[in-house]
Image (cartoon, rainbow, N blue to C red):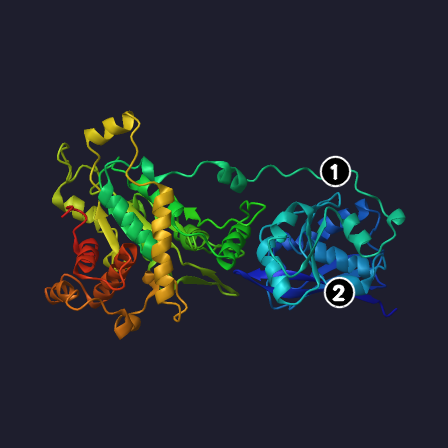
Amino acid sequence: MVGVTSKSWAIALEGLGGHPVEVETHVASGLPKFVLIGLPDASLGEAKDRIRAALNSVGAKLPPERVTTNMSPASLRKHGSGFDVAIAASILGATGVIDRAACARNAHIGEVSLTGSVRPVPGVLPAVLAARNNGFDAVLVPAASEAEARLVTGIRIVPIASIYDLAVHYGAESTLLNAPSEQPVPMPASEAQSASRRAAPDLRDVLGQEDAVRALMVAAAGGHHMYLVGPPGSGKTMLAERLPGILPDLDARRAIEVAALRSLRGLAIPDQLSLRPPFQAPHHTASAVALIGGGSGAIAPGALSLAAHGVLFLDEAPEFPRHVLDSLRQPLESGEITIHRARQSATFPAQAQLILAANPCPCGNAGAADLDCECTPQTRRRYLSRLSGPLLDRVDVQLHVEKVGIAAIKMQADGAVGSIDTTHAAAVVGEARARTRHRLADSGIDSNAEVTGAMLRSQALRPEPGAADILDEALVRGQISMRGYARVQRVAWTIADLAGRRRPNASHVAEALYYRVRDPQKGA
């Protein structure tokens, strides 16, 4: 007997991209056996038993013959249970239950249960993107992931709740199959939707920190990294948590990218595409893999990538292992992180705005006028030296945050609010960003933090005559390096954009230099 062959398609994810995987099933005479080949991992290898039980549940048993399913290209390692539906479709085509030609045109995503229902898997959104980009007519996805899949336009989405739905969609006689007895369990409200209903923290809650609020707006307007040092209770975390609220909305491309990264990690995604920048605040016990991504199986994005186009906040930064912090240096510079393994590699975006917060010493009281510090000078230096020079050299805005005085506390008790709220600050930052985009329209970048050194040396991006004299003196005195010189210029342009000026003047350069060369440990 020659045998019958049928094929369907699945998507193998690699980073945010995906590769089409041809799933071929051959049914021929021989001893009854189900063989799955094509470099599957352990969880995918177990698909044989899941699919056998699922087909039995809907009345489409495996034939008493030799069934061989191959996933091509065989050299590409396949991870996870998201190939189950494609394998089931290929088998149903080979056994004549469904139209073989129909399932060969579409991509399939999902895991099957023993009762024949189709369950959601991580990475539905990037898989649907990959299916669209590879020219598929339609993609069949778990019904529970329909809203996530429909965030992608340009491809037909077919939700299926069970193998029965899959077979009927491809023309099977419904009377010859068993309809699922269990009803789909309604999905609970996602954490993303719950979070969107909660009130975002407002900048007006910050009292007595006018300098810090000003520095926060400068960082937001230019996309600059920020380093805050101050005693416990001075408001460092409060300031960092309010930064996403004053950042501009994401465009559709970046919003889809943020949602796709969350999908890869199996995190909740709102039914409507969120345009708000993400915020990630990993604990200081996080490993390098948790921060930049990786893993022993499928390569997953870390907190840095989950914060892409948003904010990565590292509270108690000196408590992080130094090698973990230094792993951020290259991704922050290049805007992406490529993770290599023996058989595969994956690239994720890393264009996040880094906010570091630290106490001035282990006890936190150094520099406080009303508190005694128990740490020796050597202990203080050793504590803050956990933040390496090359890492801090990439941070443009560095500020000492003073402890709030009793007057501000009494004002808060009386119901007072800060001098600026999030809505007003976001409007000011948005106007500054618009000026930046207009000036840099021909360069393809939209923030001052991305401006290259060559661009800064051009005639179009020079400050007002004499404005850079103070910067030249700082370079001669060795207060800043050549890299620092360029970074001060970028911040000066941001300050000029906030002020509505066409070019930075001497006061803008002086403020930018103040953020750069000031010793944040001493506040002076």
At a point 14% along the width and 32% down the height, the residue shown is 370
At a point 64% along the width and 54% down the height, the residue shown is 82
Label 2: state its secondary structure.
loop
Earlier residue among tags 2 and 1: 2
Q: In the rendered image, is residue 229 in sight?
A: no
Using the rendered view, name the quadrant where residue 405 is placed. Answer: top left
Percent of width and height locating residue 272? 57, 47
Question: What separation in Å lies between label 2 and label 1 (alpha carbons)?
Answer: 29 Å
Left or right of 172, for residue 486: left
Please tell me which residue lies in front, 229 or 309: 309
Q: Residues within 10 Å of mark 2 (few under 14, many from 20)?
A: many
> Which image quarter is the N terminus in?
bottom right
Mark 2 residue type: Ala
At a point 45% along the width and 60% down the height, the residue shown is 349
Q: Which residue is mark 1?
A: 183
Mark 1 residue type: Gln
Percent of width and height locating residue 58? 81, 46
Label 1: state its secondary structure.
loop
Percent of width and height locating residue 452? 31, 69
Percent of width and height locating residue 157? 69, 55
Q: Which mark is residue 68?
A: none
Q: Which residue is mark 2?
A: 104
In the image, is residue 262 above or below residue 74? above
